Each structure stands twice: as C-alpha cells, then as structure tokens.
Amino acid sequence: MSKPSTSSFSAVITALRFPLIIMMVVAIHLISDKLTLPQWGAPNWLYIYIIEFLSHSLPRIAVPMFFFISGYYAFYKKDWSQRSIWTVELKKRVKTLLIPYLLWNSIYLVILLAKTQVGLRLGVGASAPFYITSFTQLLSYYWGDVIVYPLWYIRDLMVLCALGPILYQLFSWTRGYILLPLLVLFLIGWECGVAGFGTVSFFCFMLGGQLGTKQIDPLEVIQRVKYLAGVIAIGTVFTLPLLSGWAGYIVVHNIYILTGSASALLLMQYIGHRSPEVIQRLSDLNKYVFFIYAVHTVLLVNWARGIVFRVPFLSEEGSGAVLGYLLIGVLTLAFSFASYAIIKKIAPRTLAILSGGR
C-alpha cells in the first residue's frame, strides 16, 4: 500500500497538530495577566505588542482548528444514525478523552492540596493556599471551572461526541444550513454560558462535521478563496493586538480564526509540496501532542516562569523581556519532552493511559 501524499488533507492535519500545540503552550498559556493594551510611545509598547501578537493574536486559531479537525473525523464516513456507530465512538472516547481528562485534573488537584499542606507543616505557608471546602466545589473543578484550564477543550469535545447522533440528524434535516445561524453567533461572540456548550467549539466542530459527512476535502474548498483568506488573515492578525478593548474586537478576532485557519491549512499543504521531509518530521512529533497539551499547565509553565524571572534582565520589567517570554516557552517544552521521556522509560503503561492511548 502506498503512503498518502504529504499534501493530502490527512497528512496536512497530522503535520499541523504539533505546531498547533506549540501555539497553545508557547503562546496562549505563557502570557502574564499584567499586560495591557499597547500604548504608542510608552517605554514598553513594543514588548506588549509582540507579546499580545504571540499570545492573543497569532495562536488563536489553534483550539478552533482542533475542534474543526475533531468534527471532520468524527463524521467522516460514519453513519451516526446507526446505534452501533455511537456505541463504538463513545467507548473510544472514554479511553482517549474521559480517562485522561479525569486523571490530569485529579493529579493537579492533589498537587495543589499537597503543596498547601507541605507549606503549612514547614511553617512557610503558601502564596496561594488551596482548599476544597465542599463537594460542589470539587465537582466544579472537573466541569465548570476546570482546574487544568486548557482541558476545557476536552470537556466540550466529550459533550459534542456524546451528541453525535443528534448533530448528524441536524446535518440531514437542515441540509447543512444549521451552520448559517451558528456562523452568526460565532462571529458576534455570543455564548450561552453553559459549561460544555461553547459557541466556538460547537460551530467549529459542526463545520468540520458537515464537511466530513459530505466527504468533502477542506483543502479543495479553501483553494477557491486562498488569496482572499490570506490577505484578510494577515491584515487581522497584525491589527488585533491594537484592538483590545474595542467593541468590535471579537468580530475581527473571529474573522481571523476563520481566515487564519484556512491559511494555516494551505501553508502546510504548500510545505508538503515543497519539502515532504518537513511534513514527515512534524508528523513524527505527533505522539507528544496530547501529553504536552495536558502537562504544561500542571506545573511546568510556572516552573519555567519562576526560573526565567529570577534573572532581572529577563523579567517583565527588564530590557530582555521578550527574550524572557520566549525562554519560558522553550523551557516549558524542554521540561515537557523530558517528562515524557522519563515516564516512558519507567512507566510506559501509565504514559499510555495519561495520553489516551495515543
């Protein structure tokens, strides 16, 4: 059997997963909450612009693209009207989503509780003591206010997969036109406020699902508007850091998600045409994606931030602030790879469970 082309949709998606997780780790989850809108002429305006660009603009396509990919393959060549399909898919999601989701949240809860108790016993206290005072609070850490925050993606994805048969019927009953009102809600940033039912996750999953149901190659669709999508993506991504706080920010932001995602797919396809070996190397890194996604927030980002900001030059107040920001990402990834290698060596079965069998 011949290998799939490095420019095919499946090859493009496999190669994209690692860069997308880098966007989430190195960018979105590293930014300090102290930053504000860049002010022209301010001493640190360039630093703030760069960090806003790297954290709140460029990588914002990552999570929506993961939902799109998940939706596409959830419905590709699958008839969800058959109960057997739903049963098989749910069993698969228990292993790949539910068990890792519960384990990683539980691990982080234990770490936070242990950190507080150790501090109290040593008499040094904790800068942010952590307690669980009720069963309701405990449950909220697994669903509403997910304690390992990035795992909200897994939470929403589990809900969408559980609703597979209903969504499949919606595609059939509405002939795909259900996407039009969802697109409007997505663009204006409307949210129902119910955990597990985010508009971004619902729309992007449904968009991928519609194409998957019809077995349409997304790359062929995007090719028709590639230049327009590219121009809009470039224009919006560089403008977004300057628009924080503006009433229309969310619309521009979500237009970028659509056009930026399309452009990312086409860029990876182009790389596949020109440098197939790059696609292969990125695909080889795919095995690390879920582990890095889950582990980086548990402790590694804070460790990396603590190490880097001990150097005055690299702190957020120092002249090397941008370098410090990037070093946090590099250290976080290094810690993630090291943790993966250690666990694989001493407890490979545990690693498989934590990674959902990936």
Image (cartoon, rainbow, N blue to C red):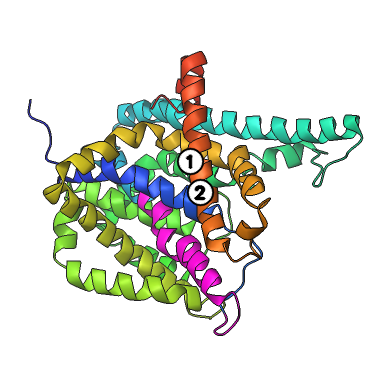
Q: Main secondary structure of the magenta part?
A: helix
Q: Marks 1 and 2, how far apart in space?
A: 6 Å
Quadrant occupied by the N terminus? top left
Please state if 133 lies on the left or on the right of 358 as rendered. right
Residue drawn where x is 58% and y is 28% of the image: 103
Q: What residue did someone put label 2 on?
A: 329
Q: What residue did someone put label 1 on?
A: 333
Label 1: few (<14), some or many (≥20) within 10 Å? many
Up-down relation of residue 168 to residue 105 (above or below): below
Q: Are marks 1 and 2 in contact (CB under 8 Å)?
A: yes
Whether residue 104 is visible here, answered yes or no, is: yes
Residue drawn where x is 68% and y is 50% of the image: 310
Residue 125 in magenta?
no
Q: Quadrant of residue 221?
A: bottom left
Residue drawn where x is 26% and y is 37% of the image: 281
Q: Which residues are magenta?
A: 39-66
Q: Quadrant of residue 224?
A: bottom left
Between 36 and 71, the residue placed more toward the observer is 36
